[in-house]
Image (cartoon, grey):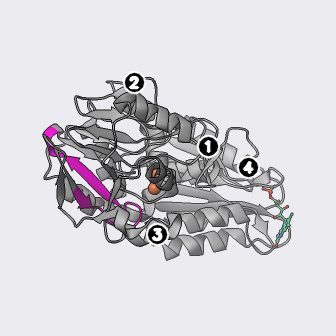
Amino acid sequence: MQKISNRIYSVGVNDDDKVLFEGLWPLPYGVSYNSYLVVDEKIALIDTVEAGFEEEFLENIHSAIGERDIDYLVVNHMEPDHSSLVGYMLDRYPQLRIIANAKTLPMLQGYYGTPQEKVLVVKDGESINLGTATLSFHMIPMVHWPETMVTWLAEENTVFSADAFGTFGVVGEDITDNEDTFELYRDEMIRYYSNIVGKYGIPVQSALKKLSGLPVERICSTHGPVWEKNVSEVVALYDKLSRYEVGRGVCIVYGSMYGNTAAAADALAIELESRGIPCAVHDLAGNNAGELGISGALRDVFKYDTIIAGSPTYNNGIFPPVETFMRALKSRLIKDRRFYAFGSYTWSGASVNQLNALAQEMNFELLGSGTSFAQAYTKDKFNASAIADLI
Ligand SMILES: Cc1cc2nc3c(=O)[nH]c(=O)nc-3n(C[C@H](O)[C@H](O)[C@H](O)COP(=O)(O)O)c2cc1C
Ligand SMILES: [Fe+2]
Ligand SMILES: [Fe+2]
């Protein structure tokens, strides 16, 4: 528990144990599920935390408000990492009213059997008075679910932003940021965005436009630090990511069964590095401990303008993890990238042409027809220097 301002308390939890977020995304630094109390004449709780943290959550609440009742539970976002203790809270605080919008209501009923009379349905822009402060609710559909809204506490220029501006990584004793926090979390924030929100660049742009009218001085997101000193930096990063804006650099993404495609990837990375071209390499077959796999690859696709994909030919097609990566690009509406494909085969190469075809579906600029080589990697079959010349 931490007091953030005269009215706001952070009562969320850190999760160090979960291995894969949403069953997909590795968590080398853990994740936090943030929840906030706004304490006034009336008390509002904003979002809950994931099931499994009941005791810690309740302790945090008690150490902030003792035995006082909670009047409202605002559900900004229904993804169960934030909503799965709604029923638990209703059991403990029977007078609690849930504040939700019309799209949230059927989800509450479907997940938790929440009775309708417990729910106060609010419309876009509506507000409730807590005494000296007001909370107003603003829909930001598809960031990243259809029911998502943010809650604005005007008296403190604070936005409770749901997953927007969130990041992987647990929070320290002090959840509020300092001068170094943004740089510390930056990569994990991009990874969170690219993995989870990346498909919804257009809705994020609409949300940013909507929020731009508010004098935001504090962002309380559902994951990661509370942003006070880096508000403009995190908003600028979200703006950049949702416009799919990238810098010059190469993301080499490959899979390999027996190391031949991997050897070509390594040779290319060495060549690019020797030329000072920013370059990230991701092995999707998971041969390297600590590899973030597709999760890290997607992060770097949101940083760099060039994607180089390597896949052996596998049953006359693309090696499955690399094909999954290509589909993940398509589903995130990735655009304006330069592309090059390579890979080893044994009797009849097919992966490179198929990678190029997928890249063309996304209107990527092909930097060449790619390099498909038979059996082992050698410098003659795979000319890293000639490929680097194309970058
Ligand atoms: C299950 C399996 C399916 C394969 N299918 C093909 C194929 O359809 N065409 C082909 O030329 N080689 C095929 N190969 C051979 C690989 O493409 C070849 O071994 C390649 O060198 C592997 O590259 P790597 O060392 O990067 O894994 C297949 C290999 C395996 C294990
Ligand atoms: Fe979410
Ligand atoms: Fe979340």
Query: From the Cβ of disc 3, is ligand 2 less than 8 Å away?
Result: no
On the picture, is 324 further left or further right than 49?
right
Q: Secondary structure at mark 4?
A: helix
Question: Can residue 147 be seen from the camera position used here?
Answer: no
Q: Of the two numbered discs 4 and 3 on the same chain, state the one appearing first in sequence.
A: 3
Quadrant where the image shows the N terminus:
top left
Which label lies toward us, 2 or 4? 2
Q: Are marks 1 and 3 in contact (CB under 8 Å)?
A: no
Residue placed under numbered mark 2 in the picture: 174
Say which residue appears at 44% left-offset and 38% top-offset.
Answer: 12
Query: From the Cβ of disc 4, is ligand 1 less than 8 Å away?
Result: yes
10 Å crowding of disc 3: few (<14), some (14-19), many (20+): few
The circle on residue 262 is: 4
The circle on residue 109 is: 3
Q: What span is in magenta?
A: 137-155
Which label lies toward us, 2 or 3? 3
Question: Can residue 174 be seen from the camera position used here?
Answer: yes
Query: From the Cβ of disc 2, is ligand 3 less than 8 Å away?
Result: no
User: Alpha-carbon distance for marks 1 and 3?
Assistant: 52 Å
Which label lies toward us, 4 or 3? 3
Residue placed under numbered mark 1 in the picture: 269
236 up-or-down from 225: above or below: below
10 Å crowding of disc 2: few (<14), some (14-19), many (20+): some
Q: Nearer the viewer, residue 350 or 162?
A: 162
Q: Is residue 204 magenta?
A: no
User: Alpha-carbon distance for marks 4 and 1?
Assistant: 11 Å
180 up-or-down from 113: above or below: above
The circle on residue 47 is: none
10 Å crowding of disc 1: few (<14), some (14-19), many (20+): many
Q: Of the two numbered discs 2 and 3 on the same chain, state the one appearing first in sequence.
A: 3
